[in-house]
Amino acid sequence: MSPKLIASIVAVSAIAIAATPASAGDHVAFSFNSSELRTANGAQNLHTSLMAKAEQVCTTAGRRSISDKNFEQQCTDQLANEFVAKIDHPRLDHVHNATQGSVRVAKRR
C-alpha cells in the first residue's frame, strides 16, 4: 500500500468554530474522518455526530424556561449550520438540508 493511500485512509479533519452562540469568543472543535463523506450513509452518520456535538455545546442541564430552551435550539441550529458550512461537502449539505429544512449548496463539488 502506498504512503499516499495510507495517508488518505487515516486522514482526519478537524474544524473549529469561533464566536459560537454558546459563548462569544469560545472555540468549538469538531473532528471527523474525511472518508465518512464518501457515502450517503457516512454523511448521515457524520451529520448525526455534528448535531450531537452542537447540542452538547448549546444545551444546559436542569430545568430551563421556554425562552432558554428556544435559545438553546437556536444555538444548536446555528452551530450545526456553521459546522456544515465549514466542512463544505455536497453529501453533508444534502443530509443537513433534508433534516433541517434549510437550503445550502456546497461551494466545493
Image (tube, grey):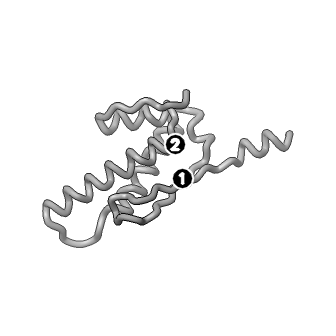
| Residue that appears at 38% across and 45% down | 81
Mark 2 residue crowding within 10 angstroms, few (<14) / some (14–19) / many (20+): some
Disc 1 secondary structure class: strand
The residue indicated by pointer 1 is 15
Question: Seen from this angle, which residue lies furthest bottom?
Answer: 62
Quadrant assignment for the C terminus? top right
Q: Which residue extends farthest left?
A: 66
Type of amino acid under label 1? Ile
In the rendered image of this protein, does residue 14 appear above or below residue 86?
below
CB atoms at circles 1 and 2 under 8 Å apart?
A: yes
Q: Which mark is residue 87?
A: 2
Horizontally, residue 55 falls left or right of residue 13, namely left
Image location (x, y in percent) of residue 13: 61, 49
Compared across the picture, whether 64 is left or right of 88 comes to left
Q: Position of residue 108 (x, y in %)?
A: 54, 31
Kindly identify the residue that appears in the image at 14 percent across and 66 percent down. Answer: 65
* Cα distance in 3D space between marks 1 and 2: 8 Å
Q: Extreme right residue here?
A: 2
Callout 2: SS: helix
